[in-house]
Image: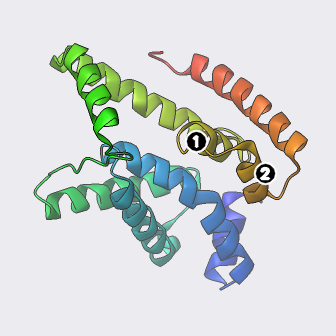
Amino acid sequence: MNDLALARRLLAGDEAAFDAFFAAYFPRLYRFALAQLDGNADAAEDVAQATLIRGVQKLRTYRGESAIFTWLCTLCRHEASGWLQRRGRQSDVLLIDDRPEIRAALDRVAATIIDDPETTLRRRELSRLVQVTLDHLPGHYGDALEWRYMQNLSVEEIASRLGLGYKATESLLSRARQAFRLGFAQVPGT
């Protein structure tokens, strides 16, 4: 379904269209917001949800001159900016594991990294390019790769989320990795 048709169905109050809209765009907006908010997962979730709500509220202004995702990213940038401003532009650090041995290993790694502005900028830009590439992959490729490599979900867990068998999920991950490699190679600056 094209973007204008989806917008028309949403404006007509079609619940199935809303479900499709949320399923298609929440994961992509979450990844986009995550990059905007320096990896703050809770903030990214809040901002992505607020963006979808704002998008539905402003849907009458969508003219189809760009993809809905591009339009939503503009709204998401505003939501992320507002979130940061309301919190005095402070970035929260999310620790997945706070065991002493993990903390020590992270401290050793941090001590070896040159924290000059150029390195920091390159690291952020690379992260942004990875997020953009994931967002533009077809189908569930971006979601599957994020679940596998960022959330460390097993193939079985991904298969369950996608409603696929184990072998089909392995095949999907293989195609997703290939699509990511090809897509990332086409991104200027990589």
Question: Where residue 145 sits: x, y (%)?
Answer: 64, 38
- Residue 152 disc label: 1
Q: Amino acid at mark 1?
A: Asn
Residue at the location (28% across, 39% down)?
100
Residue 119 rendering spot, x and y as whole percentages? 25, 16
Query: Dot 2 corresponds to which residue?
Result: 159
Q: Is residue 64 visible?
A: no
Task: Name above or below for residue 102 compared with residue 185.
Answer: below
**Disc assigned to residue 53:** none
Per the model, the C-alpha gap separating discs 2 and 1 is 13 Å
Residue occupying image coordinates x 63% and y 69%: 7
Local packing at callout 2 (Cα closer than 10 Å; few below 14, some 14-19, many 20+) is: some
Badge 2 marks a residue whose secondary structure is helix
Work out which residue is located at the far bottom of the displayed protein and give it. 13
The image shows residue 183, relative to residue 98, as above or below, that is above
Callout 1: 10 Å neighbours few (<14), some, many (20+)? few
| Picture quadrant where residue 104 is located | top left
Residue in the picture at 40% in, 53% down:
74
Q: Is residue 114 left or right of residue 132?
A: left
Closer to the camera, 141 or 148?
Answer: 148
Which secondary structure, mark 1?
Answer: loop
Is 50 situated left or right of 183 in this image?
Answer: left
Which amino acid type is shown beneath numbered disc 2?
Ala
Q: Quadrant of residue 163?
A: bottom right
In-image side of 4 versus 83 (left or right):
right
Which residue appears at 51% of the width and 49% of the height? 70
Residue 24 lies in quadrant: bottom right
Residue 84: horizontal and vertical position, in percent? 20, 56
